[in-house]
């Protein structure tokens, strides 16, 4: 495996690809739990916005801070702890770690001699945004690209899941993704400057957490979260 770095824009597209072999296809960014909890299809765009203001803002901040820790030679465990403190549901934490472990495996394979690989080797069960932040460091992404990657990934995952869960025109889901662009940039502006785990924001989304927490009890599910 070559150790040369691709252009940051190319690396960002690679990491944002839903076909990346990390288990992201098992996730719906909270859409399936929301629909099972009673969310109307017409309210999906509002769910996108709510996630960007709450869950995604936390995860983007975690990834940005994790990236900084890797580049500064600092341990990732404090970042992981800060993420866990801001993710109350153990169901949500487990779903994030399931993907994070896949990202960790990929990072160790693609960048085996990098600082990111060294940092992740010491963290056996990283959360998704922690592992993604480390991968961003290895791939040469700056803080803004890292935050944008996290936000875009959440929205596109939700939109892709909507095509499997709802009878809708695929163009509608694409329009939701495009319309979320301004809110995605809002996330970038809010978190790209962060470097300390204690500065990671902690907005609350109790209903989203409740829906996620009850999701495993449903007998008919397509997604794990």
Image (cartoon, grey):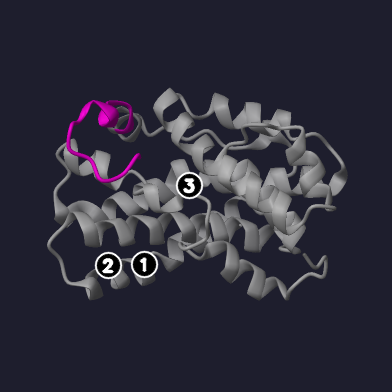
As for residue 214 lying within the magenta part, the answer is yes
Instruction: Write the residue at 84% across / 37% down.
Output: 74
Point out residue 101 in the picture as x, y percentages from the top left corner: 58, 40
60 over 85 or under it: above or below? below
Q: Residue furthest front?
A: 1
Q: Quadrant of residue 161?
A: bottom left
Q: Quadrant of the N terminus?
A: bottom right
Point out residue 215 in the picture as x, y percentages from the top left corner: 27, 32
Task: Report how far apart the C-alphas of labels 3 and 1 lie in the structure.
Answer: 14 Å
Mark nearest the camera among 2 and 3 is 2
Instruction: Write the residue at 14% across / 39% down.
Output: 38
Q: Which mark is residue 177?
A: 1
| Neighbours of disc 3 within 10 Å: few (<14), some (14-19), many (20+) | many
Q: Quadrant of the C terminus?
A: top left
As helix, strand or loop, the secondary structure at mark 2 comes to helix
Q: Which residue is mark 2?
A: 173
Q: In this image, 54 relative to 209: left or right?
A: right
Q: Could one spot residue 17 in this view of the protein?
A: yes
Q: In this image, 195 relative to 169: left or right?
A: right
Q: Nearer the viewer, residue 194 or 83?
A: 83
Point out residue 212 in the picture as x, y percentages from the top left corner: 32, 33
| Neighbours of disc 1 within 10 Å: few (<14), some (14-19), many (20+) | many
First to last magenta residue range: 212-225
Q: Which residue is mark 3?
A: 56
Q: In this image, 129 relative to 5: left or right?
A: left
Q: Which mark is residue 152?
A: none
């Amino acid at each position: 495996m070559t150790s040369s770095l691709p252009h940051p824009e190319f690396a960002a597209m690679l990491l944002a690809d839903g076909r990346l072999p990390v288990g992201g296809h098992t996730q719906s960014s909270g859409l399936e739990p929301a629909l099972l909890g009673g969310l109307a299809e017409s309210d999906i765009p509002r769910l996108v916005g709510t996630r960007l203001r709450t869950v995604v803002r936390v995860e983007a901040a975690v990834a940005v801070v994790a990236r900084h820790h890797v580049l500064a030679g600092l341990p990732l465990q404090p970042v992981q702890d800060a993420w866990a403190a801001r993710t109350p549901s153990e169901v949500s934490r487990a779903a994030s770690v399931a993907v994070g472990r896949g990202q960790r495996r990929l990072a160790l394979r693609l960048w085996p001699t990098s600082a990111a690989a060294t940092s992740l080797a010491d963290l056996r069960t990283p959360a998704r945004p922690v592992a993604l932040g480390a991968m961003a460091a290895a791939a040469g992404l700056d803080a803004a690209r890292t935050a944008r990657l996290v936000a875009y990934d959440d929205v596109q995952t939700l939109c892709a899941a909507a095509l499997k869960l709802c009878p809708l025109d695929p163009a509608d889901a694409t329009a939701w993704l495009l319309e979320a662009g301004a809110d995605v940039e809002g996330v970038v502006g809010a978190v790209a400057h962060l470097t300390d785990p204690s500065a990671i924001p902690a907005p609350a989304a109790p209903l989203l957490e409740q829906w996620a927490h009850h999701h495993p009890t449903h007998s008919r599910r397509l997604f794990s979260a």
